[in-house]
Amino acid sequence: MPLLSIETNQTVDDSSIAHLLKTASRMVAEQLGKPERFVMVRFNRNPDMLFAGDDAALVYMELKSIGLPETATGELSLLLCNLMEAEINVSRDRVYIEFANAPRKLWGWNGGTF
């Protein structure tokens, strides 16, 4: 159900990406109280990104989930920003996160919807 998309303009080596994906998956599952077997995390490098007119290191993330509580977004933002800073050296003030609560009937899986 939860999907975390991470997009950055930074080159990140494969082993660092693998570690980031595993850490982020575990973190999202724990914070949302969801089974990790339903968490999907994807990583995309896009060198054609600017933030504040500058191409310095940046990250854009989207976190979508069924039943995403608005009260959890502050803590999730802090944890995810700290993760980007620790794992791929992107300053927290160069990270945007879009949170979205997906209705069950609009989230498909296994030939149906949730």
Image (cartoon, helix red, strand yellow):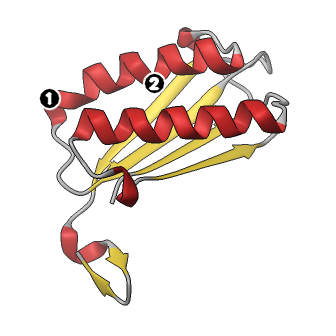
On the image, which quarter does residue 105 sit in? bottom left
Position of residue 22 relative to residue 82, above or below, is below
Instruction: Bin the neighbour count of mark 1 within 10 Å (Cα to Cα): few under 14, some 14-19, many 20 and up.
Output: few
Q: Quadrant of the C terminus?
A: bottom left
Q: Earlier in the sequence, mark 2 or mark 1?
A: 1
Q: Which of the two residues, 52 or 88, is positioned nearer the viewer here?
A: 88
Residue 64 location (% of width, % of height): 36, 51
Residue depicted at 81% across the width and 30% down the height: 12
Rendering coords of residue 39 (x, y %): 41, 53
Question: Mark 1 highlights which residue?
Answer: 71
Establish if 34 lies above or below 14. Answer: below
Q: Amino acid at mark 1?
A: Thr
* Residue 10 falls left or right of residue 59: right
- List x then y, in percent, for residue 71: 14, 29
> Residue 54 appears in which quarter of the rendering?
top right
- Residue 89 left/right relative to 23: right
Q: Is residue 49 visible?
A: no
- Mark number, residue 29: none
Q: Nearer the viewer, mark 2 or mark 1?
A: 2
Neighbour class for label 2 at 10 Å: few (<14), some, many (≥20)? some
Label 2 amino acid?
A: Leu
The residue indicated by pointer 2 is 80
Label 1: which secondary element: helix
Q: CA distance from mark 2 to mark 1?
A: 15 Å
Query: Please, is residue 90 above or below residue 4 in the view?
Result: above
Q: Quick check: 8 left or right of 35?
A: right
> Is the residue 110 above or below the residue 75 in the image?
below
Q: Is residue 57 left or right of residue 86?
A: right
Task: Answer whether labels 2 and 1 touch (C-beta < 8 Å).
Answer: no
Q: Could you say where residue 1 lies in the image, as x and y percent from the top left? A: 33, 60
